[in-house]
Image (cartoon, rainbow, N blue to C red):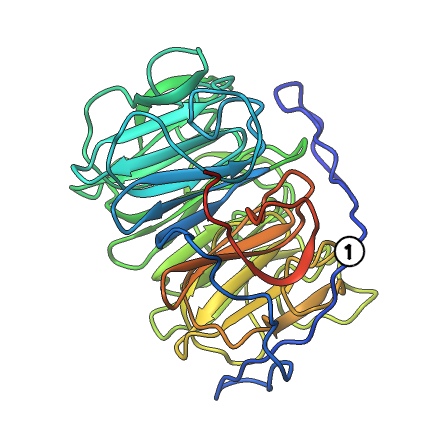
């Protein structure tokens, strides 16, 4: 696969995994083919497990917020991204230190950020690119406030940087982002992006290789913009190559309600709940049903995801796969599936949405690097896919191609 070689970005190898679990599951959606026939027996709530409102899947760790507004994280902790004051990995959720009450959290590339119930942003973990936004380049094992005292509705993390939308709908980013200027700078404090635009949301790309960063956003009037590197058409501008220092409008004139930037592709949902994607299509990432043998064709502008599913919500994050929740509450995924991250009980890539093998109805999904997590009915968190660092949060390092429940914290 082609990739950008730039001194600012380090190559991170993608680990190959041998999956050992294979089960049957079930689910049904009126808008799509019938899912597998039986629900996995292990997709049950563990005794004492946490009641989650929201989860986020990052590069090699995951985080979530419980109904009582407490943040927990699990898996790899080399940079302090679990926020518990240590660099010790954990196969089950550990509480983020500091006693802060969070409304949401976002797991990125070796760091995490969250928004408290009083709309303040905090980050923790690695700070190589200024990604904590605290005005320093120093890592932190516990949450530190993002500089400037801005009030945020939402903050999302990528690999190199984080972005957020304030309560007055302005966009800000920090870390290594390209939205202002004509040189590579690590900005350690929030800076405004898309001057003159008012955003509904921003999505920094979860890039885990030598590919350069990019960001996409949707304005309050449903217009999608992207900026950054465009070597695979991931900006959706109709062209391939180069980079854009300022936001450029996604080609085609489609209105979008939501957007999600992956490693080399972007997907969005229109107001009528149809999904479109653009960018690299190495593993069927854009979901347009491209047959094997032509899957590496780049899409420089939005193409419809096949199947006619209507999505209530797309997953946050993701590298080479995507997931979404239909209006019926069912989870579907497409793209790379080498670790079972599509959740369909196989490890076969898919260029069209496939149903996750479970009867579970989901309220929210998040895609990471080779794995997926979500919150299901009853506020139970489930994950599936790669688990070499404990990303599934079930107390093991065994991968699973179908959902497994996130375990209770260790006593």
Give the secondary structure at mark 1.
loop
Q: Which residue is mark 1?
A: 19
- Answer whether residue 156 is visible to the viewer in this image: no
Residue 246 lies left or right of residue 280; in this view the side is: left
Quarter of the rendering occupied by the N terminus: top right
Q: Position of residue 237 (x, y in %)?
A: 51, 51
Write down the quadrant of residue 376 in the picture: bottom left
| x 58%, y 41%: residue | 230
| x 81%, y 51%: residue | 18
Residue nearest the observer in this picture, 253 or 73 = 73
Residue 164 lies left or right of residue 403; in this view the side is: left
| x 34%, y 61%: residue | 257
Quarter of the rendering occupied by the C terminus: top left
- Answer whether residue 111 is visible to the viewer in this image: yes
172 shown above or below 57:
above
Q: Position of residue 80 (x, y in %)?
A: 49, 23
| x 33%, y 13%: residue | 135
275 shown above or below 90:
below
Residue nearest the observer in this picture, 179 or 269 = 269
Write down the quadrant of residue 175 in the picture: top left
Q: Position of residue 125 (x, y in %)?
A: 46, 23
Residue nearest the observer in this picture, 378 or 304 = 378
Residue 3 lies left or right of residue 161; in this view the side is: right
């Amino acid at each position: 696969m082609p990739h950008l070689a730039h001194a600012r970005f380090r190559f991170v190898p993608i680990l190959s995994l041998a999956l050992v679990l294979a089960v049957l599951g079930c689910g049904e959606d009126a808008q799509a083919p019938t899912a597998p026939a039986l629900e996995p027996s292990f997709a049950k709530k563990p005794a004492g497990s946490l009641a989650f409102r929201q989860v986020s899947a990052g590069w090699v760790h995951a985080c979530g917020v419980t109904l009582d507004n407490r943040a927990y994280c699990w898996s790899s902790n080399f940079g302090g991204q679990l926020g518990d004051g240590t660099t010790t990995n954990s196969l089950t959720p550990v509480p983020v230190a500091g006693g802060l009450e969070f409304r949401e959290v976002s797991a990125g590339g070796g760091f995490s950020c969250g928004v408290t119930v009083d709309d303040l942003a905090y980050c923790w973990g690695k700070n190589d690119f200024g990604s904590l936004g605290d005005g320093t380049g120093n890592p932190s094992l516990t949450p530190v406030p993002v500089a400037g005292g801005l009030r945020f509705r939402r903050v999302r993390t990528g690999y190199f940087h984080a972005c957020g939308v304030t309560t007055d709908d302005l966009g800000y980013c920090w870390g290594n982002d390209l939205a202002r200027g004509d040189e590579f700078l690590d900005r350690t404090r929030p800076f405004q992006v898309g001057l003159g635009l008012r955003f509904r949301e921003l999505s920094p790309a979860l890039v885990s290789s030598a590919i350069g960063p990019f960001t996409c956003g949707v304005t309050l009037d449903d217009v999608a913009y992207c900026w950054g590197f465009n070597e695979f058409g991931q900006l959706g501008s109709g062209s391939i190559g180069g980079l854009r220092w300022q936001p450029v409008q996604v080609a085609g004139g489609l209105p979008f309600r939501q957007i999600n930037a992956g490693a080399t592709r972007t997907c969005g949902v229109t107001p009528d709940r149809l999904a479109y994607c653009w960018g690299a299509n190495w593993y069927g990432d854009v979901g347009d049903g491209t047959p094997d043998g032509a899957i590496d064709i780049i899409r420089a502008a939005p193409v419809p995801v096949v199947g006619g599913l209507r999505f209530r919500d797309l997953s946050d994050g993701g590298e080479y796969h995507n997931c979404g929740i239909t209006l019926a509450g069912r989870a579907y995924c497409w793209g790379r599936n080498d670790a079972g991250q599509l959740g369909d009980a196989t490890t076969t890539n898919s260029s069209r949405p496939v149903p996750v093998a479970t009867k579970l109805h989901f309220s929210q999904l998040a895609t990471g690097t080779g794995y997926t997590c979500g919150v299901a009915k009853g506020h139970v968190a489930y994950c599936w896919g790669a688990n070499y660092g404990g990303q599934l949060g079930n107390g093991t390092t065994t991968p699973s191609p179908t959902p497994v429940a996130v375990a209770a914290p260790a006593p």
